[in-house]
Amino acid sequence: MHFPATGGSAMNSMAVGVDIAKHVFQVHYVDPESGEIVNKPIKRAMFLEHFANRAP
């Protein structure tokens, strides 16, 4: 496994934008495979679970 010279880990990073609202959050990011901008609504109750289940 190769680690960058900056001392970081082998995890991928991705910028994610989040628009917060009372019941639904809008999550925005660029899909790394297709390059498409993704705009995904996520209910407040599922927000933490969505990010906890993402691959590192």
Image: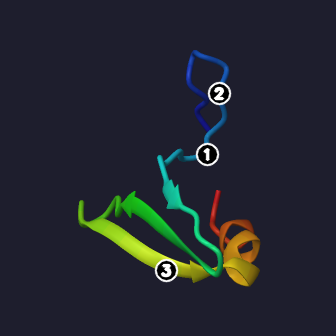
**Separation of marks 3 and 2 at Cα, in angstroms:** 31 Å
In this view, 15 is above or below 43: above
Tag of residue 41: 3
Kind of element beneath mark 1: loop
Residue 43 screen position, x and y as percent: 63, 83
Tag of residue 50: none
Which of the two labelled residues, at mark 3 and mark 1, occupies the earlier sequence position? Answer: 1
What's the amino acid at mark 1? Met
Q: Describe residue 15's horizontal placement relative to residue 42 as left or right.
A: left
Could you say which is closer to the camera, residue 21 or residue 2?
Answer: 21
Category of crowding for the residue at label 3, using alpha-carbon neighbours closer than 10 angstroms: few (below 14), some (14–19), many (at least 20): some
Kind of element beneath mark 3: strand
Q: Residue furthest top?
A: 5
Could you say which is closer to the camera, residue 20 or residue 7?
Answer: 20
Residue 37 screen position, x and y as percent: 28, 64
What's the amino acid at mark 2? Gly
**Separation of marks 3 and 1 at Cα, in angstroms:** 25 Å
Q: Which residue is depicted at the point 54% across and 47% down?
A: 12
Q: Nearer the viewer, mark 3 or mark 1?
A: 3
Name the residue carrying label 2. 8
Which of the two labelled residues, at mark 3 and mark 2, occupies the earlier sequence position? Answer: 2
Tag of residue 11: 1
Image quadrant containing the C terminus: bottom right
Residue 30 screen position, x and y as percent: 34, 58
Category of crowding for the residue at label 2, using alpha-carbon neighbours closer than 10 angstroms: few (below 14), some (14–19), many (at least 20): few
What's the amino acid at mark 3? Pro
Contact, mark 2 vs mark 1 (Cβ under 8 Å): yes
